[in-house]
Image (spheres, rainbow, N blue to C red):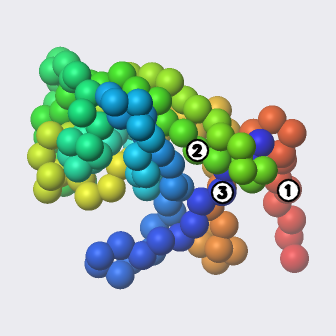
Amino acid sequence: MRINGAWASGDDGVERPVIQGRVLTGSGLWIPAPFLVDTGADQTVFSASVLEDLSLQSRAAQDRIGGVGGIVNSVLVETQIQFYRETGSPVVFRGQYRAVTEVEALDVSVLRRDIMGLFSVIVDQPGNVVCLLGQRHRYTIEQS
């Protein structure tokens, strides 16, 4: 299985590795959501704007989460995240995920090791590659 991403420019003009996904709302609709491929992230976290669009019941988290921007409040939501294989068929991840509650805390949702740990993660800016590899897909590093 291969899930492809891309290098996408943010509002600040900086290119970052992103995989386009979809998230299941409380009404059963799938909404689009880009996910930053953050190899150092401890948790998959939805941005506040995605949380608002989900219209899901949330639970208060026992602790706060932190990153470069500092410590922020978050909630827990149960939902599904969907990505697309290179064949176009969907792959779904069900779970409990964090979501920040303050818009300024996170401008794009973050993908973490709970999902990425199932794959080999390729984040190669000079080669213009962002992808998750699993099952029958492998990669080789060669010296040129």
Residue bearing mark 1: 140
Which mark is first along the chain, 2 or 3? 3
List x then y, in percent, for residue 131. 65, 55
Which quarter of the picture shows residue 71? top left
15 to the left or right of 99: right
- Residue depicted at x 86% and y 65%: 142
Q: Height in image: 76 above or below 142?
A: above
List x then y, in percent, for residue 72. 14, 40
Q: Residues within 10 Å of mark 2 (few under 14, many from 20)?
A: many
Which mark is first along the chain, 1 or 3? 3
List x then y, in percent, for residue 92. 58, 32
Residue bearing mark 3: 4
Q: Amino acid at mark 3?
A: Asn
Q: Quadrant of the C terminus?
A: bottom right
Tell me the CA gap for discs 3 and 2.
Answer: 9 Å
Q: Are marks 3 and 1 in contact (CB under 8 Å)?
A: no
14 to the left or right of 93: left
Q: Secondary structure at mark 3?
A: strand
Residue bearing mark 2: 83
- Residue depicted at x 71% and y 43%: 89
Which quarter of the picture shows residue 63? top left
